[in-house]
Amino acid sequence: MDRKGTKTVLAFYPNQLGFGFAIMENALTPKDYRIVVSRPMSNKYLLKRMKELIAFYEPEIVLLEDIETKRTRKSVRVQKLITSIVYHAKTNNIPVAQYTRAQIREVFLNFNAKSKYQIASTIAQNIPALKNRLRPKRKLFEAEPYTMGIFDSISLAITHYYLTD
Protein backbone atom coordinates (compact mmCIF):
# COMPACT_ATOMS: atom_id res chain seq x y z
CA MET A 1 0.00 0.00 0.00
CA ASP A 2 2.91 2.31 -0.61
CA ARG A 3 1.64 5.37 -2.46
CA LYS A 4 3.88 8.37 -3.09
CA GLY A 5 2.76 11.34 -1.01
CA THR A 6 -0.46 9.74 0.16
CA LYS A 7 -1.50 8.04 3.34
CA THR A 8 -5.00 6.63 3.70
CA VAL A 9 -6.59 7.92 6.88
CA LEU A 10 -9.92 7.12 8.45
CA ALA A 11 -11.24 9.98 10.57
CA PHE A 12 -14.06 9.39 13.04
CA TYR A 13 -15.87 12.22 14.75
CA PRO A 14 -18.40 10.97 17.32
CA ASN A 15 -21.18 13.35 18.33
CA GLN A 16 -24.55 13.32 20.07
CA LEU A 17 -26.30 11.51 17.18
CA GLY A 18 -23.68 8.92 16.24
CA PHE A 19 -20.55 9.76 14.26
CA GLY A 20 -19.29 11.25 11.06
CA PHE A 21 -16.46 9.59 9.20
CA ALA A 22 -14.23 10.32 6.24
CA ILE A 23 -11.73 8.10 4.46
CA MET A 24 -9.14 10.26 2.72
CA GLU A 25 -5.99 9.77 0.66
CA ASN A 26 -4.84 13.39 0.93
CA ALA A 27 -6.08 16.64 2.40
CA LEU A 28 -8.51 17.42 -0.43
CA THR A 29 -9.53 13.98 -1.70
CA PRO A 30 -12.18 12.19 0.33
CA LYS A 31 -12.83 8.67 -0.97
CA ASP A 32 -15.94 8.28 1.16
CA TYR A 33 -17.72 10.19 3.91
CA ARG A 34 -20.96 9.65 5.75
CA ILE A 35 -22.91 10.06 8.93
CA VAL A 36 -23.86 7.03 11.00
CA VAL A 37 -26.80 7.65 13.31
CA SER A 38 -27.94 5.40 16.14
CA ARG A 39 -31.54 5.47 17.30
CA PRO A 40 -31.90 4.59 20.09
CA MET A 41 -28.39 5.70 21.05
CA SER A 42 -26.11 2.71 21.48
CA ASN A 43 -22.34 2.78 21.85
CA LYS A 44 -22.34 -0.96 21.19
CA TYR A 45 -23.90 -0.42 17.75
CA LEU A 46 -21.66 2.57 16.95
CA LEU A 47 -18.51 0.70 17.97
CA LYS A 48 -19.57 -2.25 15.80
CA ARG A 49 -20.02 0.08 12.80
CA MET A 50 -16.64 1.73 13.43
CA LYS A 51 -14.93 -1.67 13.58
CA GLU A 52 -16.63 -2.66 10.32
CA LEU A 53 -15.38 0.52 8.62
CA ILE A 54 -11.83 -0.10 9.84
CA ALA A 55 -11.96 -3.68 8.56
CA PHE A 56 -13.42 -2.61 5.21
CA TYR A 57 -11.13 0.35 4.44
CA GLU A 58 -7.94 -0.94 6.10
CA PRO A 59 -6.62 2.57 6.85
CA GLU A 60 -2.99 3.26 7.55
CA ILE A 61 -4.01 5.41 10.51
CA VAL A 62 -7.21 6.18 12.47
CA LEU A 63 -7.92 9.76 13.50
CA LEU A 64 -10.03 10.83 16.46
CA GLU A 65 -10.63 13.87 18.60
CA ASP A 66 -8.32 14.10 21.60
CA ILE A 67 -10.44 13.87 24.73
CA GLU A 68 -7.57 13.76 27.23
CA THR A 69 -7.58 17.53 27.56
CA LYS A 70 -9.42 19.04 30.52
CA ARG A 71 -11.27 21.33 28.12
CA THR A 72 -13.17 18.58 26.29
CA ARG A 73 -16.90 19.13 26.03
CA LYS A 74 -17.67 15.57 24.95
CA SER A 75 -20.23 13.62 26.95
CA VAL A 76 -19.14 10.64 29.01
CA ARG A 77 -20.84 8.35 26.45
CA VAL A 78 -18.84 9.85 23.57
CA GLN A 79 -15.63 9.73 25.62
CA LYS A 80 -16.18 6.01 26.24
CA LEU A 81 -16.80 5.44 22.52
CA ILE A 82 -13.56 7.23 21.59
CA THR A 83 -11.63 5.26 24.21
CA SER A 84 -13.09 1.99 22.89
CA ILE A 85 -12.15 2.68 19.27
CA VAL A 86 -8.61 3.73 20.30
CA TYR A 87 -8.26 0.44 22.16
CA HIS A 88 -9.61 -1.54 19.17
CA ALA A 89 -7.25 0.16 16.71
CA LYS A 90 -4.20 -0.28 18.91
CA THR A 91 -4.93 -3.96 19.59
CA ASN A 92 -5.09 -4.43 15.80
CA ASN A 93 -1.78 -2.60 15.29
CA ILE A 94 -3.38 0.37 13.57
CA PRO A 95 -1.77 3.67 14.54
CA VAL A 96 -4.05 6.28 16.10
CA ALA A 97 -3.61 10.06 16.03
CA GLN A 98 -5.74 12.38 18.10
CA TYR A 99 -6.19 16.14 17.73
CA THR A 100 -7.97 18.63 19.94
CA ARG A 101 -10.57 21.13 18.73
CA ALA A 102 -7.97 23.82 19.53
CA GLN A 103 -5.49 22.19 17.11
CA ILE A 104 -8.15 22.02 14.40
CA ARG A 105 -9.01 25.70 14.90
CA GLU A 106 -5.32 26.61 14.85
CA VAL A 107 -4.82 24.88 11.49
CA PHE A 108 -7.89 26.52 9.96
CA LEU A 109 -6.86 29.97 11.20
CA ASN A 110 -4.35 29.77 8.33
CA PHE A 111 -7.38 29.84 6.03
CA ASN A 112 -9.13 32.65 7.97
CA ALA A 113 -11.68 30.23 9.43
CA LYS A 114 -12.34 30.63 13.14
CA SER A 115 -15.76 29.18 13.90
CA LYS A 116 -17.03 25.69 13.24
CA TYR A 117 -19.25 27.02 10.46
CA GLN A 118 -16.37 28.93 8.84
CA ILE A 119 -14.26 25.76 8.93
CA ALA A 120 -17.08 23.81 7.25
CA SER A 121 -17.46 26.56 4.63
CA THR A 122 -13.72 26.49 3.89
CA ILE A 123 -13.90 22.73 3.41
CA ALA A 124 -16.95 23.03 1.13
CA GLN A 125 -15.18 25.65 -0.99
CA ASN A 126 -12.15 23.40 -1.48
CA ILE A 127 -13.96 20.09 -1.92
CA PRO A 128 -16.77 20.75 -4.45
CA ALA A 129 -18.55 17.45 -3.73
CA LEU A 130 -19.37 18.78 -0.25
CA LYS A 131 -20.97 22.08 -1.28
CA ASN A 132 -24.47 20.61 -1.25
CA ARG A 133 -23.90 19.13 2.24
CA LEU A 134 -23.25 22.49 3.86
CA ARG A 135 -26.36 23.86 5.53
CA PRO A 136 -27.00 27.58 6.13
CA LYS A 137 -25.43 29.02 9.25
CA ARG A 138 -27.59 28.04 12.18
CA LYS A 139 -29.28 30.43 14.52
CA LEU A 140 -28.30 30.40 18.18
CA PHE A 141 -31.48 28.56 19.19
CA GLU A 142 -31.21 25.87 16.48
CA ALA A 143 -29.62 22.47 16.86
CA GLU A 144 -26.50 21.70 14.86
CA PRO A 145 -27.30 20.04 11.51
CA TYR A 146 -26.39 16.36 11.63
CA THR A 147 -24.38 16.72 8.38
CA MET A 148 -21.84 18.76 10.35
CA GLY A 149 -20.32 15.42 11.43
CA ILE A 150 -18.95 14.99 7.90
CA PHE A 151 -17.21 18.37 8.06
CA ASP A 152 -15.92 17.62 11.56
CA SER A 153 -14.33 14.36 10.43
CA ILE A 154 -12.82 15.95 7.32
CA SER A 155 -11.46 18.85 9.40
CA LEU A 156 -9.77 16.24 11.58
CA ALA A 157 -8.17 14.62 8.51
CA ILE A 158 -7.05 17.98 7.07
CA THR A 159 -5.51 18.87 10.43
CA HIS A 160 -3.62 15.56 10.40
CA TYR A 161 -2.26 16.12 6.90
CA TYR A 162 -1.37 19.73 7.68
CA LEU A 163 0.50 18.89 10.88
CA THR A 164 2.30 15.80 9.56
CA ASP A 165 3.32 16.84 6.04
Image (cartoon, rainbow, N blue to C red):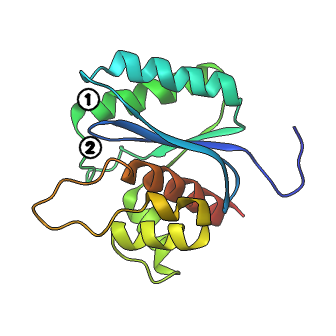
Residue ID at (51%, 26%) = 50
Instruction: Decide: is 123 above or below 111.
Output: above
Q: In which quadrant is the C terminus drawn?
A: bottom right
Question: Residue 94's x, y, as percent?
Answer: 66, 30
Look at mark 1 in the image and give the residue it sits on.
Answer: 77
In front here: 124 or 105? 124
Q: Residue furthest front?
A: 132
Question: Residue 33's x, y, as percent?
Answer: 56, 44
Q: Secondary structure at mark 2?
A: loop
Q: In which quadrant is the N terminus drawn?
A: top right
Q: Is residue 165 left or right of 101 when viewed as pictured?
A: right
Q: Which mark is residue 74?
A: 2
Instruction: Decide: is 44 above or below 111.
Output: above
Q: Amino acid at mark 1?
A: Arg
Observer able to see residue 138: yes
CA separation in Å, label 1 and label 2: 8 Å
Q: Is residue 113 left or right of 15 when viewed as pictured?
A: right
Q: Amino acid at mark 2?
A: Lys
Residue ID at (65%, 36%) = 95
Question: Residue 55's x, y, as percent?
Answer: 65, 22
Residue ID at (56%, 61%) = 159
Residue ID at (28%, 70%) = 137
Question: Residue 77's x, y, as percent?
Answer: 26, 29
In front here: 107 or 119? 119
